[in-house]
Image: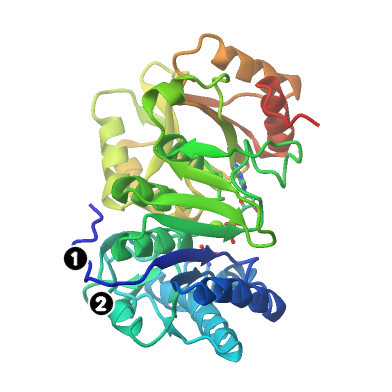
Amino acid sequence: MDMASHSIPEHSYDIVVQKFGGTSVGDLERIRKVATRIGRYVESGKKVAVTVSAMGRTTDRLISMAKEISSRPSRRELDVLMATGEQQSIALVTMMLHSLGIKAASFTGAQAGFLTNEQSGNARIVEVNPEKMLKAFEEIDVAVVAGFQGVDDEGNITTFGRGGSDTTAVAVAAALGASECEIYTDTEGVYTTDPHVVPSASKIDVIDYDEMLELASLGAKVLHPRAVWYGRRYGVKIHVRSSFSYSPGTIVTSLAEDKKMKTERPVTGVALDLNHSRINVVGVPDHPGVAADIFMALGHANISVDMIIQGVPGDASRQQMSFTVNKDQVEDALDAIKPVLDKLGGTAVADPKIAKLSVVGIAVGSTPGVAGQIFEAVSSVGANIEMIATSEVRVSVVIQDDKAKDALKAVHTAFNLDAVQ
Ligand code: ADP
Ligand code: ASP
Ligand code: MG
């Protein structure tokens, strides 16, 4: 369980917490703009705790270099490598702030007090101790914190998973007792779906943590799911907005139940996830305990499984099942279940060419006909539905990835989510 189990020392100043994503610090000119924006808050007498991501595509580049050496590089070393991306940014942003005459200092994850568990590449925050930052605020006005990283209790560098700088920022806000965290990105806020894929998507002004958590977990990468979880847990409002304008963005907060239910549309948003692969297991015996053996093995290997279906067996004594896992865990998953398959009989193959499309909304489960409307829209672009999962607040379907974007557009339109032109 994540926690920030320290008491917040007394201070007499207001702290603003902001996060700038990869595009926002993509080059030195953009870093200058970010520093200028931060400077405005400093001029108004505030202290600013800034989190930054790696510049542009730096993290992708670092990962592909590692993969040139090995298809499965050591996870510990990969974390050491990836963490350097954010470390470049904190130094450059801090230097830029200095050049504008602003008193600032950089903090790596460890220096900012981020203690995590030992799960390389997907570490959970155990504690944030902001003592060093608060001490520094006696002398400086801006603390620049490296996103998506901490250290475990052995001192190993860990990272929080792709997109995890959002979580750093919200955790910093919680640790400093700030009630709001601004996430600056390359869109004007959270939209009904990815506006870079569906340009007619509508901007959402206010969204509840629960719906945002679903959208984020189902692939809307505008916010890291753990950031939303942190915001809800510690009551930190998240303001997602553009780093290229001063217009208000989207507020992620806790909406009263009655307000949530009053929404005119059952669907708040549609998310597309291209980051999962399906593993098809065929020819395993059809008797009790087989699924348990397979999924226990995956659990022991720390692999989260998303959707699961068990198929109708062709031959009465044999069974088939499919499940989806994150793309970067496919090889680990195949390794984990190999001993079970060797023992029971059966084979497993991975299919990376899948996409998961999900509609999310507080009333999705209780509104009749939502599933039918989705299936109709998906079939209108010729996509075949291969897996289905539902809950109170979402319906997800797995389809082939080459039809995914067309299906996304069709579903978005079917639920009247397109912006009024
Ligand atoms: P940053 O580097 O600022 O963290 P990300 O690339 O991680 O930015 O997240 C922003 C991107 O998320 C947008 O450019 C957009 O393409 C994508 N995105 C996906 N779903 C949504 C959504 N529902 N609303 C807004 N953006 C979305
Ligand atoms: N730089 C990391 C990534 O690209 C973390 C982040 O940007 O949030 O995933
Ligand atoms: Mg991001």
- Above/below status of 165 relative to 110: above
Residue 265, percent from left and from top: 58, 20
Q: Which residue is mark 2?
A: 131
Name the residue nearer the viewer: 1 or 281.
Answer: 1
Q: Is residue 140 left or right of residue 349?
A: left
The image quarter containing residue 370 is: top right
Residues at discs 1 and 2 in contact (Cβ within 8 Å): yes
Residue found at x 31% / y 39%: 295
Name the residue nearer the viewer: 222 or 356.
Answer: 222
Count of all numbered marks drawn on residues in the image: 2
Q: Which residue is mark 1?
A: 6
Residue 178, numbered circle: none
State which tag comes first along the sequence, 1 or 2: 1
Secondary structure state at the residue bearing disc 2: helix
Residue 82, percent from left and from top: 49, 73
Q: Is residue 253 left or right of residue 357?
A: left
Q: Quadrant of the C terminus?
A: top right
Q: Amino acid at mark 2?
A: Glu
Residue found at x 46% / y 51%: 238
Secondary structure state at the residue bearing disc 1: loop
Q: Does mark 1 have its CB less than 8 Å from ligand 2?
A: no
Q: Is residue 180 left or right of residue 356?
A: left
Q: Amino acid at mark 1?
A: His
Mark 2 is surrounded, within 10 Å at the Cα level, by few (under 14), some (14 to 19) or many (20 or more) other residues, namely some
Residue 351, percent from left and from top: 57, 42
- Above/below status of 91 relative to 237: below
Is any atom of residue 418 visible in this view? yes
